[in-house]
Image (cartoon, grey):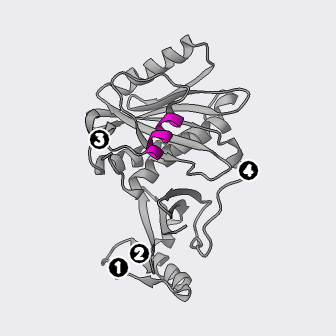
Amino acid sequence: MTQRLSPLARAGLLLFSVAVVGALIGFAWEGEVHEREEARLEALMTSATQELNASSRAPSSAQASSGISEAERNIIQRATQGLPPYKGAVPQALAADFLGPNAPMAAAWFMTEDSPQEVLGFYQGSLLDAGLPIYFHNYNENAGYVGYMEPHTKVMHTVSVLVQGQQTAVFVSKGKVADLLDNPVPMPAGLSLPPGAGEPMVLSFREEGRVRYVITADLEPEKVNALNAFYRGALEPQGWVMDEPEPGSNQVSFRRGSSRFDAAVQREGAAARLYLTLEQQE
């Protein structure tokens, strides 16, 4: 069996990858990544690393290559197409088309004992040798990205790296996401954001007849304590039943038949980040 990431870990890693691509679309081709966007990426980088550390370690090559499904194999092929293979790497599927039909994208990941700079140096050299116009950026010695855009199709190939303990997590992706800026994925029907929430990022994953939405948004810190009351008022009239919350928790869960909804808040210094997960039949 391949390693399964928790929904929160998967969302954090995908948001980091999406944010990298979004920054490149918006700023990199003008020669500079805006300071505010870079600060946001660094925050996502930290969050994604913590979530990856909280999940189990990556399996061995033998474990990763056994039990892989045809869908996972297809995701890996899509994500790695157009990039050279990395020595000894066994990529694992992360997700595909999680940004909706307007942004086809596939992402995979693998772990290596090499440093982030060794990984980025390999891809940077290989892509330059192939005559491709690359983009490249280091946040610090522990994280960065490299990649290129196909000029005619606007498809982006990206490699982003994060330190995870004594190893480096490497994320490879291929996608056409520029149209997402004009056509974002809408919120699921019947679900709304609480007062004080910012513009949401909506991801969706489909598996075996079920769909899981993961939504994140900035949240004004003073609105955190009103989260439970807001969702009780919004969901109970629709037939949802709230699970008993843990005392002092910033998380609330609801059930309706085979559907489940979770809302949680993660503090980020003086700011707060809202995470919503909705799982239901497709």
Q: Are marks 1 and 2 in contact (CB under 8 Å)?
A: yes
* Quarter occupied by the C terminus: bottom right
Q: Are marks 2 and 4 in contact (CB under 8 Å)?
A: no
Q: Mark 2 and mark 4: span between their CA atoms?
A: 32 Å
What amino acid is found at the position of numbered circle 3 in the picture?
A: Ala
Tell me if residue 214 comes above or below residue 135 in the rendering.
below
Q: Residue 245, which numbered label?
A: 1
Q: Nearer the viewer, residue 131 or 71?
A: 71
Q: Given the current orientation, which residue lies at the most extreme top position?
A: 129
Magenta-drawn stretch, dominant element (helix, strand or loop):
helix
In this rendering, the label closer to the viewer, 3 or 4: 3
Pointer 4 residue: 182
| Magenta span of residues | 70-79
Residue, x 71% and y 26% (percent of image)?
A: 151
Q: Residue 258, which numbered label?
A: none
What amino acid is found at the position of numbered circle 2 in the picture?
A: Val
What amino acid is found at the position of numbered circle 1 in the picture?
A: Pro
**Image position, residue 209 (x, y; %):** 50, 63
The secondary structure type at the circle numbered 2 is strand
122 relative position to 166: left or right: right
Q: Mark 3 and mark 4: span between their CA atoms?
A: 36 Å
Q: Are marks 4 and 1 in contact (CB under 8 Å)?
A: no
Q: Residue 252, which numbered label?
A: 2
Q: Earlier in the sequence, mark 1 or mark 3?
A: 3
Q: Nearer the viewer, residue 87 or 35?
A: 87
**Image position, residue 92 (x, y; %):** 39, 39
**Image position, residue 155 (x, y; %):** 65, 33
Quadrant location of residue 195?
Answer: bottom right
In this rendering, the label closer to the viewer, 1 or 3: 3
What amino acid is found at the position of numbered circle 4 in the picture?
A: Asp
Q: Mark 3 and mark 2: span between their CA atoms?
A: 30 Å
